[in-house]
Amino acid sequence: MREDPSRFDKAYYESNYQNYLRQNPDHKMEFYRGLVSEHTRGIEQPRILDMGCAFGRFLGHMDPSWRRVGIDVSEYAVREAARSVSSVGFAVASCTAIPFRGPFHAIVAFDVIEHVPDLQPVAAFVNSELDWQGVFVFVVPVFDGPLGGIVRRLDRDPTHVHKNSRQFWLSWARQHFELISWTGIFRYLLPQGTYINWSTRTFRGIAPAIAVTVRRIPNR
């Protein structure tokens, strides 16, 4: 089974993420940036790939000294990204057939791989194109714990093919990579337009989303 590009058109974004900019405010992008920069300090002209870049908000918040590329299965999203973010290479591509080649010092997938039916090619690509010093950071919603039922009720995105527990994602990460860290994220767009994005290690076992950071397994 493969991703269906036709499902991620303009109507998809207008139906599921009509508040896209409010749901991706500057402070959330800075949080994502911190997840990457924490493990990439001291690298000259680092390279980063954003898998599922959507409108390019995250890449636009990275330092211009980074060599930045992004892919998305949506032609509409890539067109919008190229129009709003300069000095970044974008391509319409699936997470299982990426045209850009590494080595990358960071590969990120923020709320993306839960849309990808076959996760094996994702792990294979990351392991083949990630620099030995690099990190793969992904964020996914999780549907277990005391808040799992609420997450399911609030999740209206029909393209989420993996509605799994945090243990599923941590097991997948450990199977293919060296797990560095993971944290929980509480996030919600309030009615007045304020977006909450609170990360926590203390309550990561009940948070409705998690951020996971991994490296390639040495000598694999």
Image: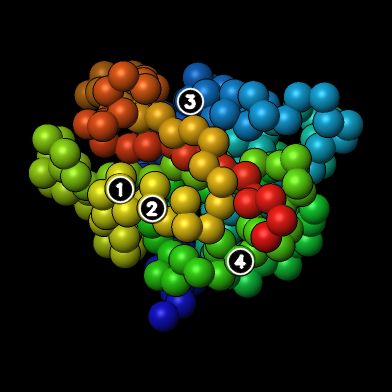
Residue at the (38%, 53%) spot, across then down = 171
Residue that badge 4 annotates: 124
- Residue 119 position within the rendered picture, expressed as x and y whole percent measured from the top left: 46, 66
In front here: 169 or 62?
169
* Label 3 or label 2, whichever comes before in sequence order: 3
Q: Residue at x 64, y 41 (%)?
A: 135
Picture coordinates of residue 190, whole percent (x, y)? 25, 23
Instruction: Return the residue found at the far bottom.
Output: 1
- Total marks in image: 4
Residue bearing the label numbered 3:
28
Give the quarter of the image for residue 129.
bottom right
Compute the Cα span from label 4 to label 3.
28 Å
The crowding category of the residue bearing disc 4, from other C-alpha atoms within 10 Å (few below 14, some 14 to 19, many at least 20), is few
Amino acid type, label 2: Ser
- Drawn side of residue 80 relative to residue 103, left or right: left
Q: Residue at x 69, y 50 (%)?
A: 218
Residue identifier under label 1:
167
Q: Quadrant of the N terminus?
A: bottom left
**Closer to viewer: mark 4 or mark 3:** 4
From mark 1 to mark 3, how far is it between C-alphas?
24 Å
Label 2 – label 4 distance at C-alpha: 16 Å
Local crowd size for mark 3, using a 10 Å CA cut-off: few (<14), some (14–19), many (≥20):
some
Q: Are marks 2 and 4 in contact (CB under 8 Å)?
A: no
Residue 171: assigned label: 2
Instruction: Specify whether residue 90 is in view.
Output: no
Does dot 3 land on a helix, a strand or a loop?
Answer: helix
Mark 2 vs mark 4, foreground winner is: 2
- Mark with earlier residue (2, 4): 4
Badge 1 or badge 3: first in the primary sequence: 3
